[in-house]
Each structure stands twice: as C-alpha cells, then as structure tokens.
Amino acid sequence: MQTMKLIFLGPPGAGKGTISKMITERLGIPQISTGDMFRAAIKEKTALGLKVQAILAAGALVPDELTIAIVKERLSWPDVRQSYILDGFPRTIAQADALAEFSELDAAVDFEVKDDLILFRLTGRRVCTSCGAIYHRVTKPPKVEGICDLCGGNLYIRSDDQEETVKARLKAYHDETEPLIGYYQKRGLLLTIDGSPDAETVYNTFISEIGRFLKK
Ligand code: AMP
C-alpha cells in the first residue's frame, strides 16, 4: 500500500476524528489525536493531565512546547514510520514549523465547515467511554440511548462540548489555527474538502482526491 503522512486541519467538529477513524479502520493507517492523548492523560491523572486539565476545560490551546514534545515522542514509534494521520496537530504556526523539522508530510487536509454547523454538531455529540466511537443526538443516534452500538459502552458528552466552550474553541481555531491553511497552501500541500456532508460522502471525497498528493 502507498504510504501517507497527513495532517488534518479544520475547526473542532469538522469531522477530523470521524474521518480519521474510518481511514484507520479501512486502510489501517494509525491516527494520532493530540486531543485524545490529553484526555487520556487527564483521565489517568498523570503529570501531563494535571497540567492541561484546566486548559482543555476552558477550550484554550495547550502550550506549544508541551504539545510538540508529546507528538515528537509519539512519531518516534515504529507503527507510524510509514504512514500516519495527525488529527488536531499542528494547531499553530510554531507547531507546524516544529513538525517540519521532524517529519515530512504528503498533505494537509483541511475540512471546511461553517461555524453554525459546528455548534450544532458539537453540542449534540456523544462519545463512547470505552471505544471512542462518535454519535450525534439527532443525526447519528445510537440504537439504545446512551449506549454504544459497537461495544455496549456508555456514551458521554465531552465537557468541552458545552456551548460556551465550543465558542471559545472556535475562537482559538480562527485566531491560531486558520493561518495554517495559507501556510500549507504556500507549500503546495493543501487539500481542501467540504466537511459539511455526511461522513461517508466526506470519506469518499477524501479517497478520490488524496491520490494526487501521494508518492508513486
Ligand atoms: P480536540 O479533541 O482535537 O478537539 O482537542 C481538544 C483540546 O485539546 C483542544 O481544545 C485543546 O485544548 C487541546 N489540544 C488538542 N490538540 C492541540 C494542539 N495541537 N495544540 C494545542 N492544544 C491542543
């Protein structure tokens, strides 16, 4: 199989996590989600978790040095030597510059979704505590309320999916992450995809477009 080293850009709730999980399941490419790593650290009450807990709760960004250090370490593992999807990293120009020093990307995929749809998606999002599967109260309800269709785990609402926190996260996105679109466009690495349709449609668009960025 072709190798692919990708980053997923786009606002919170654009579908980065959902599409990454589909690619992991169908193509076997590992997903590295900095948000998931921080949430796991918070749950396990590690030193990192204690440092970042209040930052995530406020919808702000974790400092660059901390975030860069965990991604750099994760990218040294053998499973991601050939291919990976960085879901939610980089989120600042400083992170993008650091990444360019320790890994070479094939593409930066930007999932475009308008703010009002983001608010609807995130405030209705439900996540499985045990397998991480993602549902939506209206558009993708589980068969049994509160229970994961896939593994039977309990579903929960991410604490940062409350409306006020979503607004703070959107502001952080527009202020600090959106400039990365121009950054990767200049480098010829940008693939823009409409992230507003259903996940299957977005996935199919991704599959039909990504080939031109991959090495033969
Ligand atoms: P996500 O699951 O990607 O929406 O990330 C959840 C939260 O984790 C964000 O709101 C930030 O507080 C933090 N976070 C995740 N990735 C990064 C990053 N690359 N830089 C800074 N903070 C991050």
Image: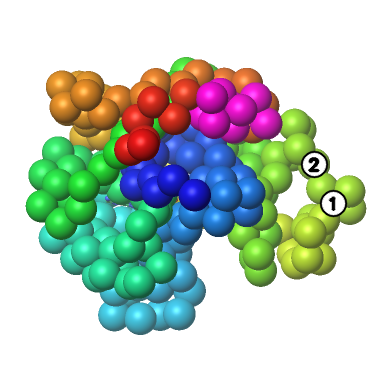
Within 8 Å of ligand 1, the CB of disc 1? no
Tell me the residue that label 2 is attached to.
Answer: 141
Question: Do the residues bearing badges 1 and 2 touch, measured as CB atoms within 8 Å?
Answer: yes
The amino acid type, in three-letter code, at marker 2 is Pro
Tell me the residue that label 1 is attached to.
Answer: 145
Residue at x-position 75% and y-position 31%? 139
Q: Quick check: can you spot residue 141?
A: yes
- The vertical placement of 27 against 179, above or below, is below
Is residue 171 or residue 186 the one in the foreground? 186
Is residue 165 or residue 154 the one in the foreground? 154
Q: Which residues are magenta?
A: 200-208
Is residue 24 or residue 169 the one in the foreground? 24
Q: x, y (%) of residue 76?
A: 26, 69
- Classify the position of the C terminus by image quarter: top left
Does 101 sit left or right of 91 as displayed? left
Q: x, y (%) of residue 116?
A: 52, 20
